């Protein structure tokens, strides 16, 4: 018997198809993982189930009954509870008060009674919380338990957890997994959204993999491996860029040594990373998202200060350099978040001029003809479908990316750092971006390509490094790499030993 | 029963130009309730508000007099806001300029106007910058919320003024809490004889023009706007976000300081506690009404100046409280803000 059935779910955000005819079945009493990269459509699908979004097409049945879920209130009534990544607790209220908040019973509130009720519920579901404690003094893990208890308190039989482990320390993860096991025994169904392979394999019964808004497949845990899942997550159709034969390579232009960095939560996201990129090669860094790629690209873009280690550009120590200094020595940067590298409310021409503004200025006054001419030239050169005076925010994702490419690549950078350069782009724009990166390599630039798309890495890179939990698992030449081997490394189950890596490096 | 749904859809450009006019109409409809309550005829009241001040030369000049400090505080606030620095402290920075003006007026006894007036302007600008400095440094160094710090410093400087006026600067003859009259050479000359319109108005218009030029035509202005509209993107493109914000904050304070000097050297000729009465806060209204565009700010300041003058004539002619002018200003701000948001939506029948 299915606890939840979703059929043919379609959800569009403007031009973006976030969910493309998704079918999803949840059995009674199973823990079902929803696995996929950032932007694969996992959270969107679950927000539809919880009534936070409305699907454009498709239908949902809960316990066999066709259901229209228009708001979280409807979902709660049908026994569906969701713990989102951002908690919805009132920090200044106690745990018991937070749970009583969403109850609709009478006018008065007896603090003794609600504390007793919550303590009872805590006992019954086996979730340790302190009913009288103020939420703002609780750790993130404790707050998450309160959220889960809140859902169960409202008689949830289906529990949706959106990346629950992302905020937890390892010990708390253990506690969470024990609780999930208990829920399964009690016949509850759990949907576990994640992009971490090892967790999914530890705790889930079945796994549905999403990619680009579509279901790649649903597999039993016992019938799959971490490597297969990794391939399902990151694979994409092959595309029309062909690799050239072996090439002679130049000097080391970018050298990274023992680089470390902390993420926003203060945890070590990069651990002693070392590699080097030569002129005229594309060095690819593959890996499942959230393994330190973001931090690495931010450090190399000068927007995040490293916690240790050094890096050199053309022999010059740039470890503490700011973005302006990096532009100066010829480091072209393509960030993974387009919206954080272009100012949406400024025009195409202004955005293009911004990075090298001093060249478009006479005594501090903008040379508007030169800015305009430069923009017009790059717009035709890079086939940007916009005019120089258009606001960036009115452009499509592909055209925004072309603006960034135009701004950075037209300066003939010696090092190009491209972070997820094709994420969210359509096929045409994707091919265009890839072609431009190859052009840079042929011109003699040292290109560092960070991508979650394994096919992209395999098609473009000359050497491939795999990053897992902030560490490089190994570096192998692209012509020796197989998808299986890379998949094993991406899931953290295999690594090329240091010796091998060095051999390759010196070869 | 037909159902309606609100959806996000920006209004077409032609409609946006009507927003200020629509805001004024809506404001007058809302505030006419109060006018009727005060037992006056709304149409007559709004005639007094908007038309009567412009109907004779004396009060038309008075509109410009009232607009002078507002042009400056509006420009000051808009300059900081353009770079994403929320300076709520124009009021305090204005007082800092006024204190400096009063002090210079005391010490520059026999100065010639050719030296005295430039010194007053420079001193006022500097004093405003100084008062704006601590919150700006705290913002860029420690990320302390500037809304709180600039706002609180407004109260602090009032105590400072009170100290000067009740202590060292107290008028020795009358014992009133006001500073001695400033030296002749530091007084702003009149633009029109026997009116209150003074040199400060020209300063204000020039400042508005310079601000437009800086924001629209210079590299510094483009960097400021980039920081204000997309801090992360600006940083990524190599803009020094902290330095840009700090400069914008200090210049903003300086412009507000000019407003204080103008009130001392052009209107009052000595420092009193009530020299501003909220000019700095009204600057926030003006900057918002003008959508941070210097030319829009110019119009907004003149309009608020008109309402201020009109409020006096309404109260004289119809016997309604003079505070009606404040209510109209406040309502206009709220209506305009609401319209800025509402213009992004439309109601659709489903």
Image: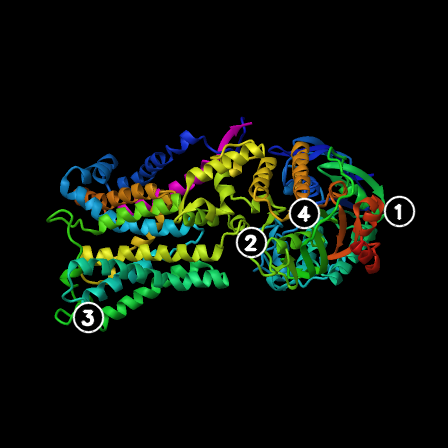
Q: Is residue A97 above or below residue B214?
A: below
User: Looking at this view, is B63 or B218 the one in front?
Assistant: B218
What separation in Å lies between label 1 and label 3 (alpha carbons)? 89 Å
Please identify the dominant SS of the magenta region: helix
Q: Residues within 10 Å of mark 4 (few under 14, many from 20)?
A: many
Q: Which mark is residue B170?
A: 3
Tell me the quadrant of the picture where the C terminus of chain B can be found.
Answer: top right
Do the residues at discs 4 and 1 belong to one chain? yes
- Whole-angstrom CA distance, mark 4 to mark 3, is 72 Å
| Earlier sequence position, callout 2 versus callout 4 | 2
Residue B76, given in percent of the width and then of the height, sits at 34, 52
Work out whether residue A105 can be spotted. Answer: yes
Q: Nearer the viewer, residue A317 or B158?
A: A317
Question: Are both tags, 1 and 2, on one chain?
Answer: yes
| Callouts 4 and 1 close, C-beta under 8 Å | no
Q: Which residue is mark 4?
A: A447
Q: Chain of mark 1?
A: A
Estimate the spatial distance between the alpha carbons at disc 3 and disc 2, rounded to whole Å: 54 Å
Q: Pointer 2: what residue? A: A323
Which element is circle 3 on? loop
């Amino acid at each position: 018997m299915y606890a939840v059935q979703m059929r043919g779910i379609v959800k569009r955000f403007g031009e973006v198809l976030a969910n493309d005819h998704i079918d999803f079945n949840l059995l009674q009493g199973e823990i079902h993982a929803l696995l996929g990269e950032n932007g694969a459509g996992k959270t969107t699908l679950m927000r539809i189930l919880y009534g936070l979004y409305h699907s454009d097409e498709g239908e949902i049945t809960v316990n066999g009954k066709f259901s229209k879920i228009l708001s979280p209130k409807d979902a709660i009534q049908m026994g569906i509870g969701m713990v989102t990544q951002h908690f919805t607790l009132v920090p200044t209220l106690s745990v018991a008060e937070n749970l009583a908040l969403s109850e609709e019973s009478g006018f008065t509130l007896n603090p003794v009674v609600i504390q007793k009720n919550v303590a009872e519920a805590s006992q019954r579901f086996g979730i340790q919380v302190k009913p009288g404690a103020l939420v703002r003094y609780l750790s993130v893990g404790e707050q998450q338990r309160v959220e889960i208890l809140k859902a169960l308190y409202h008689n949830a039989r289906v529990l949706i957890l959106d990346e629950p482990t992302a905020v937890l320390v390892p010990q708390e993860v253990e506690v969470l997994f024990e609780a999930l096991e208990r829920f399964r025994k009690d016949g509850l169904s759990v949907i576990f959204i994640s992009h971490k392979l090892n967790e999914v394999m530890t705790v889930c019964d079945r796994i549905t993999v999403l990619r680009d808004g579509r279901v790649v497949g649903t597999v039993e845990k016992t019938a799959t491996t971490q490597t297969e899942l990794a391939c399902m997550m990151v694979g994409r159709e092959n595309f029309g860029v062909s690799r050239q034969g072996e090439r002679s390579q130049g000097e080391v232009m970018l050298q990274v040594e023992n680089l470390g960095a902390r993420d926003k939560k203060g945890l070590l996201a990069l651990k002693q990373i070392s590699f080097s990129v030569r002129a005229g090669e594309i060095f690819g860094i593959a890996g499942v998202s959230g393994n330190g790629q973001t931090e690495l690209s931010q450090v190399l873009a000068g927007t995040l200060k490293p916690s240790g280690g050094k890096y050199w550009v053309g022999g010059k120590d740039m470890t503490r350099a700011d973005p302006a200094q990096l532009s100066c020595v010829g480091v072209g940067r393509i960030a993974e978040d387009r919206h954080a590298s272009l100012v949406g409310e400024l025009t195409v021409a202004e955005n293009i001029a911004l990075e090298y503004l001093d060249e478009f200025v006479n005594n501090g006054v903008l040379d508007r003809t030169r800015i305009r001419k430069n923009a017009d030239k790059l717009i035709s050169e890079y086939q940007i479908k916009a005019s120089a005076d258009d606001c960036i925010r009115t452009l499509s994702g592909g055209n925004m990316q072309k603006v960034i490419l135009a701004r950075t690549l037209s300066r003939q950078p010696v090092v190009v750092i491209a972070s997820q350069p094709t994420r969210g782009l359509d096929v045409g724009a994707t091919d265009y971006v890839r072609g431009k990166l190859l052009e840079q390599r042929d011109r003699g630039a040292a290109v560092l390509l960070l991508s979650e798309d394994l096919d992209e890495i395999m098609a473009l890179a000359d050497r491939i490094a795999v990053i897992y939990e902030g560490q490089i698992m190994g570096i192998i030449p692209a012509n020796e790499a197989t998808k299986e081997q890379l998949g094993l490394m991406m899931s953290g189950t295999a690594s090329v030993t240091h010796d091998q890596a060095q051999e390759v490096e010196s070869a | 029963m037909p159902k309606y749904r609100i959806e996000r859809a920006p209004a077409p450009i032609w409609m946006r130009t009507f927003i200020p006019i629509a805001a004024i109409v809506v404001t007058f409809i809302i505030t006419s309730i109060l006018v009727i309550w005060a037992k006056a005829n709304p149409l007559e009241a709004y005639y007094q508000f908007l038309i009567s001040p412009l109907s004779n030369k004396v009060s038309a000049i008075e509109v410009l007099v009232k607009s002078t400090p507002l042009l400056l505080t509006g420009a000051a606030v808009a300059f900081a806001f353009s770079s994403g620095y929320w300076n709520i402290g124009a009021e305090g920075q204005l007082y800092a300029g006024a204190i400096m003006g009063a002090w210079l007026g005391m010490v520059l006894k026999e100065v010639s106007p050719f030296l005295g007036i430039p010194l007053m302007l420079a001193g006022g600008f500097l004093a405003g910058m100084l008062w704006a400095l601590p919150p700006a440094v705290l913002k860029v160094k420690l990320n302390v919320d500037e809304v709180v710090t600039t706002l609180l410093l407004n109260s602090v400087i009032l105590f400072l003024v009170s100290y000067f006026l009740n202590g060292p600067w107290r008028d020795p003859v009358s014992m009133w809490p006001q500073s001695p009259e400033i030296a002749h050479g530091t007084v702003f000359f009149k633009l029109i004889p026997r009116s209150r319109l003074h040199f400060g108005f020209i300063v204000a218009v020039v400042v508005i023009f310079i601000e437009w030029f800086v924001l629209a035509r210079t590299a510094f202005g483009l960097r400021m706007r980039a920081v204000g509209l997309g801090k992360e993107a600006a940083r990524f493109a190599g803009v020094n976000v902290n330095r840009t914000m700090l400069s914008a904050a200090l210049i903003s304070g300086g412009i507000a300081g000019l407003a204080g000097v103008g009130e001392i050297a052009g209107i009052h000729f000595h420092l009193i506690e009530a020299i501003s009465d909220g000019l700095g806060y009204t600057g926030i209204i003006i900057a918002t009404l003008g959508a941070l565009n210097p030319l829009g700010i110019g119009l907004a300041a003149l309009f608020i100046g008109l309402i201020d003058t009109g409020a006096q004539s309404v109260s004289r002619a119809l016997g309604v409280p003079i505070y009606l002018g404040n209510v109209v200003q406040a309502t206009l701000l709220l209506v305009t803000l609401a319209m800025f948001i509402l213009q992004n939506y439309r109601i659709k029948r489903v």
